[in-house]
Structures are given as structure tokens and as C-alpha cells.
Image: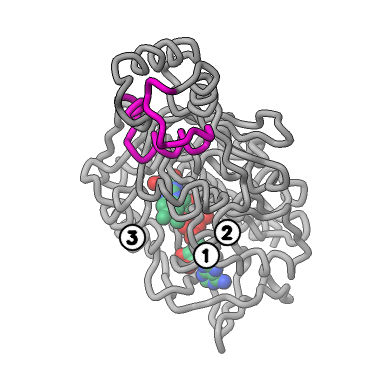
Amino acid sequence: MKKTDIAVIGGGASGLVAAISIKKYSDFKVTILEKQARVGKKILSTGNGRCNLSNNRIDGSCYNGNNKLLNYLSSDIPSTEDFFTEMGLACKSDDQGRIYPHSMAASSVLDALRFTASAKGVEILCDSNVSEIRKAKKGYDIIYGENIINADSVIIAAGGCATPSLGSDGSGYALAQKLGHSTTALYPALAPIRTDINNVKALKGLRTYAKATLLSNGKPLAEQSGEVQFADGALSGICIFNISSLAAKYIKKSEIMLDIAPDYTKKEISYMLFTIKETRASLPCEELLTGLFHKRIGQAVLKNSSIALSKTCGELSEKEIYRICDIIKDWRFPVTAVSDWSLAQVTSGGIKSEEISDNLESLFAKGVFFCGEILDIDGICGGFNLDFAWKSGYTAGKNSAEYIYSIKDKK
Ligand SMILES: Cc1cc2nc3c(=O)[nH]c(=O)nc-3n(C[C@H](O)[C@H](O)[C@H](O)COP(=O)(O)OP(=O)(O)OC[C@H]3O[C@@H](n4cnc5c(N)ncnc54)[C@H](O)[C@@H]3O)c2cc1C
């Protein structure tokens, strides 16, 4: 049987940093067990291949789930930018505070982590799918394939369920459950929101700037502005992603209200449309909106306002113009589902926070720590999820090293 001091299950964002952090605080033997053929596959896909690794505006309001977990992060943790700069990776921010590698290549981020882990002597075992963590006489026996490795401490950094093709498929929860843990309800988040296909069929492929409000039983739950993309039976785009975590929880009776002209009041729009009605009086009514929206969006607005397209602009009644204004400012799309795990960037929900101590250690299995997406916290788009993965990985690594010191002291 192989032996190590600390085993890290999962060589993704949080697991790689956990291993590096252990080596910063100790010389303990660290082994990463990664089920895929290489570590950090997901990192390469982040930020459209550019890796939005953090944000200058991190605070609790950018997270769903239990954002108290942010208080569990180690107080002497360096900023994400400093942490990466120390590893030779230059970073830069855009005008919205999103932090990227200077190279704008996610591979640079993964290389910085891989080179550092290797220089510090972290052992990496790829193609090692962990199926069980078993309490042993001393520490834990970790089963992967036909093999077993014994470790005094274990860090579970196996991610959530989002985008299983990149490695994390929910098996981390199963490992934790065998140790007595349970999870809150798990939902796909940062994902397109599905709606009645007939509502968006004619709009497929188009984008428009909008304010999107998530309503449940008519009550607003969340609001985001930005570019909305009309996809195959779904609404997509960053502002939709950011409300998807809540949408998944309130699917029954929830709908999305789009204001597709958020920079104008209803009064301003009606004034504009009454003017166009006169200047384009003899033209087909679909020309009423071509100065405001893409032609196909205009047509869909008219259809939803129950306007016969055979009319001319001049034939539109006052009532009809107001109906069009209503749809522009309040266009409803019933939520039928949030896209499945294959299109989700993160998992909403995770290991119940009340089952872990404030140093990210299991309350059921001493010496077992958690970090990253497996925990019950998920951020909006903008670098918040990776920031939590790095920082919780750093914290879990440091705390597991301290745990090993404490058990060695007792001997
Ligand atoms: C397409 C995409 C784009 C994204 N872009 C961004 C972005 O730009 N900015 C941002 O902040 N966030 C982004 N995210 C989210 C971010 O990548 C994740 O939140 C983050 O990677 C979570 O880190 P983690 O270490 O917890 O899990 P992961 O990075 O998923 O790593 C978990 C690792 O554990 C391994 N593993 C799982 N189970 C086992 C097992 N049983 N045995 C052994 N190994 C196992 C997996 O193979 C994987 O390598 C994106 C996500 C996706 C899918």
C-alpha cells in the first residue's frame, strides 16, 4: 500500500492550490489523485480560454449559498493576484474589475500551478479515480481503481457536478456521503435558462441589451442587466447566467421579465413610437421598431403584442402602441428549466456548511478537509468562483498541514 501524509482528491483549481499551500507551510508528503489523464483540465476552459481568475470587487453579495464560508478563509491568505504573481504569472484587470492572466491564456495559469507544484515536490497521480475514503487504523485508506493509498489527512477537492466532461461529475459528494456528510439541494448554475421554445424560436442567435428580472409568483427575486442571447429554446448570456442559480430553485411559477429598452422610460418609448407612426405611416407596421431593435426582435415584439403584421404603421391604434410599449418594457418568458449539468459552469448547493468546522474540516471525520465548488457556495460570473476555489484550497491546505503537525506533536 502506498503511503502519503496528505492526499488531495482532485487536481483542479482548488486541489492544485491546496497542495501548493501545504508545501508552503510544511515539508509533508503531498499526493494529488486526479481521475483524468491530466490535472486542471477545467481551468483551460475557463473565461473562454482566457481564465477570469479573480475580481477586484470580491464581497459576499457576489455569492449565493452560504456566503459565511468566506469568513472561514484563512486570514493570512495572499490576494489571488499576489499569489499568482509570486508563481511568476503576471495579471491584469479589465474595466469591470475582472482579473485575467496578462497572457490572456488560461494555459499560463495552469502552467504556473503545475510548475510550482512540481518544484515543491507534490506527487501527482493522474488516471486515479477515487471511489472511497475509508477510515483506517491510522488515517484514511483511499481507494482508487485497484490501488490503495493511506494518508493521515485528506482534502476533498473534487468539484461539483457542472460540466462533467471536464472531470467533476458529483463523485466528490458520494465520497463525502460515505463519511456521513449530506448536501443541500444541488442545482446547475451559471447556465442558460430554458423557456417555451415558441417564445424564442424566431429569435435564435440574436443578442440584445436588456434588464432581466427573475419573478416567482410575480414577485421579483433578482435583477441583472447585460447582453441577453436568444438560444435554442433558452435565454442565455452573463446576466441570465447570474440569475440561473435562483431560477433553478424557483422553477415552479417563475418567469423572466425582460426590459429590452432599459435606458428609456415607457413614456419616452411611447413618444418615440407615436412619432414613428406618423413619419412611417404608409410603411408596414414591422418598420415601427426597426430603429430600436433588430428586425426579428421587432417582429417578435409585435407578435407578442397581438398586432396583425398586415397593418401599416399609420393604422396602429393608440391602444396597440401602448401594448407594444408594455411588451418592450415587460416581456415575459416562463421558466421551464435551467439547462442541464452539461451546460452549467458551476454547482449551486454543496456539502452542508453546518457539517464542517470553520477551518473547513469535516465534523464527522477528523483530518478530512473540503475546498472549492464541493462546498455550498457559488458566485456570479466574473472570476468569483475561481477566486473561492483558490482561497479555499489555500486555506484547506494550510489547515491540513496544521492538523498533521498537531497529531505528530501528540506522539
Ligand atoms: C466552461 C467553464 C468556464 C468557467 N469560467 C470561469 C471563469 O472564467 N472564472 C471563474 O471564476 N470560474 C469559472 N468557472 C467555474 C470554475 O472553473 C469552478 O468553479 C472551479 O474550477 C472549481 O474548482 P474546484 O477545484 O472546486 O473543482 P474543479 O476545477 O472541477 O476540479 C475538480 C477536479 O477533481 C477531479 N475529480 C473529481 N472527482 C474525482 C474523483 N472521484 N477522484 C479523483 N479526481 C476527481 C476532477 O477531474 C477535477 O479535475 C467556469 C466553469 C466552466 C465549466
Q: In the depicted view, which residue is nearer to us: 382 or 146? A: 382
Query: As displayed, is residue 44 above or below residue 285?
Result: below
Q: Horizontal placement of 140 versus 159: left or right?
A: right
Looking at the rendered structure, the secondary structure element under dot 1 is loop
Disc marking residue 114: 3
Does any atom of ligand 1 lie closer than 8 Å to the CB of label 3? no
Is 44 magenta? The answer is no
Q: Are marks 1 and 2 in contact (CB under 8 Å)?
A: yes
Please state the horizontal and vertical placement of residue 68, each as a whole percent of the image: 66, 36
Query: As displayed, is residue 324 above or below residue 190?
Result: above
Q: Which residue is mark 2?
A: 160
What's under tag 2, amino acid-wise?
Answer: Gly
Q: Which residue is mark 1?
A: 168
Q: Are marks 3 and 1 in contact (CB under 8 Å)?
A: no
Looking at the rendered structure, the secondary structure element under dot 2 is loop
Please state the horizontal and vertical placement of residue 15, each as a whole percent of the image: 49, 58
Q: Horizontal placement of 324 versus 95: left or right?
A: right
Residue displayed at 48% across by 27% down: 328
What's under tag 1, amino acid-wise?
Answer: Ser
Q: In the depicted view, which residue is nearer to us: 279 or 328? A: 279
Residue displayed at 38% across by 43% down: 53
Does any atom of ligand 1 lie closer than 8 Å to the CB of label 2? yes
Q: Which residues are magenta?
A: 287-315
Q: Residues within 10 Å of mark 2 (few under 14, many from 20)?
A: many
Q: Residues within 10 Å of mark 3 (few under 14, many from 20)?
A: many
The residues bearing labels 1 and 2 have C-alpha atoms spaced at a distance of 6 Å
Q: In the depicted view, which residue is nearer to us: 80 or 236? A: 236
Residue displayed at 49% across by 44% down: 385
